[in-house]
Amino acid sequence: FISSRRCQILLEEKAQSSLPFFRLLAFNAIGNFFSIILPGSSAGDVVKFFYFRNLNHKLSHSSLASLIALDRLIGILGLLTLGVALCLIRSSHILSLNPDLWIFMAASILLLIFLAIFILVVLAQWWIKRKLSALLKKRFHAGQN
């Protein structure tokens, strides 16, 4: 449900119209099915790409591909956050098993930080572009009156 809602928010922004949530939920479920059944986990993303393309013809191929990639990165960020949080909570136990695992824990934390910064930069560019566009529209409409 959360992934479908996230896709709905991103797709509605690009399509500039509302999209039916339950249809997106069904498309995500179909994509997940194909990710499990077909070899390689990206097969479901390809199926979702074609289903999402039929939702609204304002959605370009490049924007759909980037939205699906961003959705995948956000999912990885969630899994990595969970893993790092559990490693930090259980760090004394993990290090008692093998003291060399601190390298793995440090690498996981660094990867989490870099991935979070990357996603924040991508989303900040989108947010700034959206706010700037709204501000310019308001300015130009106010100047025409």
Image (tube, helix red, strand yellow):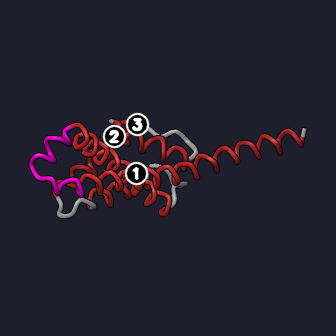
Res. 25 mark = 2
Q: Mark 3 vs mark 1: give the one in front.
A: 1
Span of residues in magenta: 90-104
The amino acid pointed to by label 1 is Ile
Residue 92 image position (x, y, % from top left): 17, 41
* Label 1 neighbour load within 10 Å: few <14, some 14-19, many 20+: some
Are circles 2 and 3 on residues that touch, CB within 8 Å?
yes
> Which residue is at 40% across, 38% downward?
5
- Quarter of the view holding residue 8: top left
* Figure check: 30 above or below 1: below
The amino acid pointed to by label 2 is Leu
Secondary structure, mark 2, is helix
Q: Is residue 79 magenta?
A: no
Residue bearing mark 1: 113
Secondary structure, mark 1, is helix
Q: Is residue 26 left or right of residue 57?
A: left
Residue bearing mark 3: 21
Residue 37 vs residue 103, the one in the foreground = 103
